[in-house]
Image (cartoon, rainbow, N blue to C red):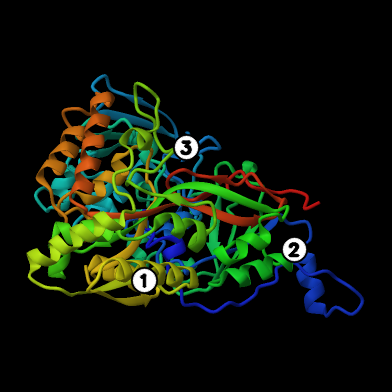
Amino acid sequence: MKFKLSLLVALGLLLSVFLVACSGGDEETVEEEEATEETEGENILNFTNKAAIPSMDPSMVTDEFGFQFIGTTMEGLYRLDENAEPAEGIAIDHTVSDDGLTWTFNLREDAVWSNGDPVTAHDFVYAWQRAVNPDTGSEYGPYMMGGVIQNATAVNAGEVPVEELGVTAEDDYTLVVELENPTPYFESLTTFGTFMPLNQKFVEEQGEEFATSTDTLLSNGPFKLENWESTSSSWDLVKNEDYWDVETVQLDKMTYEVVKDAQTQVDLYEAGTVDRADISADLVDQYATHEDYEVTPETSVFYLKMNQTRNEALGNTNIRTAISQAFDKQSAVDVILNNGSIVANGLVPADFTPMPESGDDFREVSGDLVTYDKEAALEAWEAGLEELDTDTVELELLGGDTESAKVMDEYLANQLETNLPGLSITLKQVPFEQRLDLDTSMEYDLQTAGWGPDYLDPYTFLSLWITDGGNNKMGYSNNEYDALLEEATTELATDNVARYENFLEAEKILFEDAAIAPIYQRAKAQLISPKVEGVFVNPFGADYEYKWASVGSAE
């Protein structure tokens, strides 16, 4: 999923502190006493978020925040458990045909939407058809379903009717899915936000207003979103009493405030107003010995995208190679981030997926494909300038407008200008939603961006750069790269050893072409209250799982 996500995301919203629980006393006002009575005994956690939620439409969301809150308020066929394994959701179980192409899901009959309507197989058929329908304009629908669900690509291209998508309701509680090719990771795909069901009657009643506010949403998951509009700087998640497994849900409520500044987050944490705070690089040394300090390694990778279509210089392989080698990544993670993040010298992250036979980590086997090397960068740079018949290059670097994003982008620009003579970089720092739009329209030269996996397979990263892919958005194309990935999802779909060999070769080609310039693999430094219990960090999909969360003792 896109990070146009996280340390490099932008938000331009003001902090407003929302105090949830008040303690009573002789001098408290009547209103405060009533508020205390309302919250007394409730299990409430208070969090911050780095940006507003751009959309809650499962067909249209592409960012980490939308997927996070869709994952918390909705439920697909399965959801991830503590071990990141698919656990029962709307599906009770499923069977798979011998050829791996037909998946039949048996759905529970006690699941309902928050308006009381039953959740049925028809809701999945409608939602999945809507996601690939070209009239919808979904980016993730064709990306997640193309080449997986039968006819998804053809439907999205307008070549066949949407009704020919390989998903049918055999009856109200039996969903049959026909795959284009055997897909080893399909079960985990069904936990992802794009695959959530939708209540057709409700969606069509809302029209263009669907999923833009609390009033135009339905939930079928553990929580409901309240007090939210797409521009809101605060909102609440409350327990969904209509959820089929509501007895498992222990939290009554979670409150969220958009907080841009890390110091402000920490101040709110120290005041007891919020229960979790992200720690920026300049605060790590101060709080590293704090008893609530935690570092969580993640599988999200950040890199420079290099748009080959807007600036002639970036169409030159030597220029891109020079840029990818000309900045000190170790200093970036040690000084600029200082939060446990590690250097990225490839695309597929470390400790993400093992090789099928040996069990060795994919990243270890693939190795370091692009490293910081000033001399090699300068050599490639001079060759590129000669090929372009110029001695200067001007580029614009698109990034976020948070303090951490600005610091990182300023560092990268300085490194590149220092190590590549004749290069001039202009910074363009914009809010989160605007950066999503500029990426989609390819109105950038360089861009700091990132990707978190959507399922547990290298393909979730490597498929980003397929020619004309929905997430490519930088004009990269290599026929051999495309062919390797096509073969991995068709002829080799049931041969995992051979699939992974193709993935290794494809990743090597990506960096021979200097398509992107990897920077770091993210870790997150935070202060987390000991009363926050049972919150799982997912290796793919939504960052956090709250279904099993609870409020423990803060002592």
Residue 109 badge: 3
Residue 39 badge: 2
Residue displayed at 79% across by 68% down: 36
- Residue 381 in sight: yes
Q: Nearer the viewer, mark 3 or mark 1?
A: 1
Mark 1 residue element? helix
Mark 2 residue element? helix
Residue 243 at x, y percent in the picture:
55, 47
Camera-side residue: 58 or 90? 58
Identity of the residue furthest to the front in this view: 375
Circle 1 residue = 414
Gap between marks 1 and 2 measured at Cα: 51 Å
Residue 516 at x, y percent in the picture:
26, 55
Mark 3: give few (<14), some (14-19) or many (20+) Cα within 10 Å: some
Sequence order check, earlier mark of 3 and 2: 2
Q: Nearer the viewer, mark 1 or mark 2?
A: 1
Q: Is residue 154 above or below residue 235?
A: above
